[in-house]
């Protein structure tokens, strides 16, 4: 790391540092700002979305709850209203029946005279609101009245302001033709023997009843051979009343459901509605059920029962209570519409239909036998009955009523095909509502339930008819019960419509909300993009500014350092007088000042050193001159001593004296040699050595030197080898050259205890190289330089084994240098040394006197 950093200049480092310090926080700041903005945008978007979702959810739940509540409320109210209508109708029917009780009691008090009876029939009438003739519509799909009864709408004056709120007017409810119709089909007086004695038949019943007087104690003489009242009458006490079941011929039908030309054509049947059963708007021209209910009471005269009076109530009056009733805002109609499902029916105390918009459903009798034919049966019960082979009534006596009734059962097709489809709730096992009605009214109560029938939710109500005369006193249900069916959907149509409207509104507001949410999100996106762009731009600008400032500051700081460095370099390169600029008082100024002070000190010591060096050189020169002078002075007497010692050695006869003289002479020679060396060195150092160059044969010179040393080499047992060319011309001072070769060769022999010494001469046009190599003791690597210094020897004076002064190499080096050449030494301890003398071929005396 440090090394890596060291590669950069201070300026680059400073710039990097400034940029890092400023730019990284800037980038972090920008990044934080950006993520914060982005997160905010995201959370606003999420919040808006979940808020919209929550609002929509709340809206939908509120709407759903409101609609469900209003549906429930409307259903409740409608249920209540229809239940009320049902119980009211049941009560009205009961009152109507009670009124007939009064009629029969009054009839019992009538004189048994024909005109009295006739008057009774003609005066006991009731308004009967029937419908007129109907005909198929032009398209053959429905029925319409043949004559339209149009009423001009009533002109009702505008309500008073106080009454104006929800002022609601209804036209009179009589919509059909009102006619009076005798209440009773006949009045009879029966003697105690069971024979009719007096009878008045209403005009409306002449086709139904006979005016003949008959013995009604015999059933075949009764209406439709079906009446059995004589047995009951005999048990009556005065004032007691007998009321019969509904007696009428079962209307056979070959058609169930709407009977129109269009349907007949579709089924490929002849259109003969008048032969089928009447069914309100489904078939307004069909065969009507015609029946009666007989009231009877004893006739008492003077405390004695003298006979019985009977009144046959026209069943049509009873049927009018339910046929005209509609459980809809219409309330009443002259004709029932069984297809709508909104209609009322009436059942007797055993659960047999006694009033139905479809007359063929009313339970009647077989006119031939007076028996009740089998009612409409489901597959299971019908098959069972068929299998039994019994007449229906005998078979039914053993069948439990209301057996496992459920919607999933089907009517037996054969049962339907007979055209005898009376509804007897006890055995109508594919209509579970029968069980429901039975449960509601069995104890005289009332109520309702909802049942899904033909895919429609139907509310059905039931209310017992509280009429308890005669044998009905034993039945908690009374005379029978009223049921009303109504489509539940009709009750809450308004709520369903509001639900649809609310749905549409919710969808619309959903759309608006989605648009708003989209636009909010796109705004957030745009704002985020703008923020990002702004942040990037400002960050980039700031980075540029920071980099520029960094460069400027780095320059400011580093330029002063660079100046200091440049100043120091100049000083180092010798400009000792150079000083740094000192500006200001900061650390850089102090550094410059310190440097200047140091430079002052260094310069002063340099000056002092120079002076000392000059003094030393002067002293050295003086020393050399002294030594040169001294040597010369010494040489003269020494030569005298040597000469005389030589003379003495020749002249003296005494051996001892002569050897003493020879010792003096030899010592003198040695001393002279040393002296010469010292003199030479001093001469050279004093710059006074004079060269006398001349053309010589270097080889010859070498050979003569070799021959001088041959003896000493041989004495040591050394082999001396010389590889020399024939001739080698050189211009050099022969004395000095000989001195150099002499020194080098004598050293080689001196420091080689055994082995060889080689001399080789290489000759090039410019350079002549003399190599003297030995296999001697060698020179330690650290000494290779210093041996050329005067008085330097590898051995110290305590250990030295060889004689010498340490001046030889120093002199040789200086002489060769004066000749314009050089000496190079190489050596390996214990192996040997090699000294190479390299000389210019034409060496001339170098007049530059070197002192080194
Ligand atoms: P001297 O021979 O008088 O001592 P020199 O100046 O001739 O002085 O040599 C200096 C020293 O260099 C010698 O003392 C010796 O230690 C070393 N020297 C010179 N030549 C050789 C050689 N050929 N082999 C080993 N040592 C040498």
Image (spheres, rainbow, N blue to C red):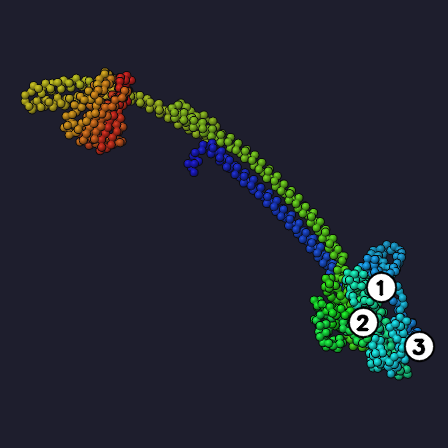
To which residue does mark 3 refer?
Answer: 114
Q: Quadrant of the N terminus?
A: top left
To which residue does mark 1 refer?
Answer: 334
Foreground pick, 590 / 692: 692
Q: Earlier in the sequence, mark 1 or mark 2?
A: 2
Question: Where residue 697 appears, x then y in whole percent?
Answer: 21, 18
Instruction: Give the quarter of the image for residue 565.
Output: top left
The answer to whether the residue bearing label 3 lies less than 8 angstroms from the nearest atom of ligand 1 is no
Q: Is residue 86 visible?
A: no
Foreground pick, 48 / 206: 206
Tell me, yes or no, whether the two marked residues, 1 and 3, touch with CB atoms within 8 Å.
no
Q: Earlier in the sequence, mark 3 or mark 2?
A: 3
Foreground pick, 517 / 6: 517
The image shows residue 253, relative to residue 721, as above or below, that is below
Q: Which mark is residue 250?
A: 2
Q: Earlier in the sequence, mark 1 or mark 3?
A: 3
Could you tell me which residue is drawn at 78 percent across and 65 percent down? Answer: 256
The Cα atoms of the two marked residues, 3 and 2, are separated by 32 Å
Question: Where residue 590 appears, x then y in whole percent?
Answer: 44, 29
């Amino acid at each position: 790391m440090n090394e890596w950093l060291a590669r950069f200049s201070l300026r680059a480092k400073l710039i990097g540092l400034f940029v890092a310090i400023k730019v990284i926080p800037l980038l972090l700041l920008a990044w934080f700002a950006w993520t914060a903005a982005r997160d905010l945008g995201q959370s606003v978007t999420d919040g808006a979305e979940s808020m919209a979702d929550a609002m929509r959810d709340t809206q939908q739940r509120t709407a759903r709850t409101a609609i469900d509540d209003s549906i429930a409320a409307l259903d409740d109210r409608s249920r209540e209203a229809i239940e009320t209508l049902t119980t009211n109708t049941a009560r009205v029917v009961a009152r109507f029946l009670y009124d007939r009780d009064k009629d029969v009691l009054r009839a019992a008090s009538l004189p048994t005279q024909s005109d009295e009876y006739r008057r009774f029939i003609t005066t006991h009438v009731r308004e009967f609101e029937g419908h007129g003739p109907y005909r198929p519509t032009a398209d053959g799909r429905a029925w319409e009245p043949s004559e339209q009864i149009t009423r001009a709408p009533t002109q009702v004056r505008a309500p008073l302001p106080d009454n104006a709120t929800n002022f609601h007017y209804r036209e009179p409810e009589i919509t059909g033709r009102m006619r009076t119709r005798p209440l009773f089909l006949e009045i009879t007086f029966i003697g105690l023997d069971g024979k009719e004695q007096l009878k008045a038949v209403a005009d409306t019943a002449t086709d139904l009843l006979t005016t003949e007087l008959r013995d009604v104690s015999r059933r075949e003489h009764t209406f439709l051979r079906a009446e059995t009242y004589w047995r009951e009458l005999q048990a009556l006490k005065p004032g007691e009343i007998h009321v019969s079941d509904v007696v009428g011929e079962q209307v056979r039908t070959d058609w169930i459901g709407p009977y129109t030309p269009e349907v007949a054509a579709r089924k490929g049947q002849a259109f003969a509605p008048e032969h089928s059963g009447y069914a309100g708007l489904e078939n307004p021209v069909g065969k009507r059920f015609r029946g009666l209910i007989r009231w009877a009471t004893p006739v008492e005269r003077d405390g004695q029962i003298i006979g019985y009076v009977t009144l046959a109530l026209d069943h049509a009056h009873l049927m009018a209570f339910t046929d005209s009733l509609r459980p809809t805002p219409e309330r009443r109609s002259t004709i029932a519409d069984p297809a709508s499902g909104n209609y009322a029916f009436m059942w007797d105390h055993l659960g047999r239909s006694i009033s139905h918009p479809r007359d063929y459903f009313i339970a009647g009798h077989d006119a031939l036998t007076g028996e009740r034919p089998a009612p409409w049966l489901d597959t299971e019960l019908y098959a069972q009955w068929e299998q039994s082979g019994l007449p229906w009534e005998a078979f039914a006596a053993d069948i439990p009523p209301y057996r496992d009734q459920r919607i999933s059962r089907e009517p037996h097709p054969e049962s339907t095909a007979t055209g005898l489809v009376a509804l007897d709730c006890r055995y109508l096992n594919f209509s579970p509502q029968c069980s429901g009605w039975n449960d509601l009214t069995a104890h005289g109560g009332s109520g309702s339930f909802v049942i899904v029938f033909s895919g429609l939710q139907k509310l059905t109500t039931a209310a017992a008819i509280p009429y308890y005369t005669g044998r009905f006193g034993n039945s908690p249900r009374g005379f029978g019960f009223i049921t009303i069916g109504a489509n539940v959907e009709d009750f809450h149509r308004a709520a369903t419509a509001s639900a649809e409207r609310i749905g549409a509104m919710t969808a619309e507001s959903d759309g608006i909300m989605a648009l708003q949410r989209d636009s909010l999100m796109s705004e957030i996106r745009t704002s985020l993009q703008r923020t990002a762009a702004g942040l990037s731009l400002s960050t980039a600008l700031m980075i540029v500014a920071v980099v520029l400032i960094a460069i400027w500051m780095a320059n400011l700081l580093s330029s002063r350092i660079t100046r200091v460095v440049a100043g120091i370099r100049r000083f180092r390169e010798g400009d000792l007088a150079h000083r740094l600029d000192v500006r200001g008082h900061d650390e850089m100024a102090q550094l410059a000042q310190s440097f200047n002070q140091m430079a002052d000190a260094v310069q002063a010591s340099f000056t002092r050193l120079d002076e000392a060096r000059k003094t030393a050189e002067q002293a050295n020169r003086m020393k050399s001159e002294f030594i040169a002078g001294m040597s010369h002075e010494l040489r003269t007497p020494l030569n005298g001593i040597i000469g005389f010692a030589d003379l003495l050695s020749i002249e003296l006869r005494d051996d001892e004296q002569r050897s003493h003289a020879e010792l003096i002479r030899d010592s003198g020679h040695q001393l002279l040699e040393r002296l010469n060396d010292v003199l030479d060195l001093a001469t050279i150092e004093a710059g006074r050595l004079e060269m006398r160059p001349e053309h010589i044969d270097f080889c010859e010179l070498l050979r003569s030197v070799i021959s001088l040393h041959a003896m000493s080499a041989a004495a040591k047992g050394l082999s001396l080898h010389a590889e020399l060319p024939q001739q080698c011309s050189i211009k050099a001072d022969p004395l000095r050259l000989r001195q150099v070769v002499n020194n080098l060769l004598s050293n080689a022999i001196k420091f080689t205890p055994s082995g060889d010494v080689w001399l080789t001469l290489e000759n090039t046009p410019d350079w002549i190289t003399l190599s003297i190599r030995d296999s001697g003791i060698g020179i330690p690597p650290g000494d290779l330089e210093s041996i050329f210094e005067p008085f330097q020897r590898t051995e110290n004076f305590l250990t030295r084994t060889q004689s010498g002064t340490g001046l030889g190499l120093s002199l040789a080096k200086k002489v060769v240098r004066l000749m314009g050449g050089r000496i190079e030494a190489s050596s390996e301890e214990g192996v040997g040394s090699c000294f190479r003398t390299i000389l210019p071929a034409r060496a001339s005396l170098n007049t530059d006197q070197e002192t080194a």
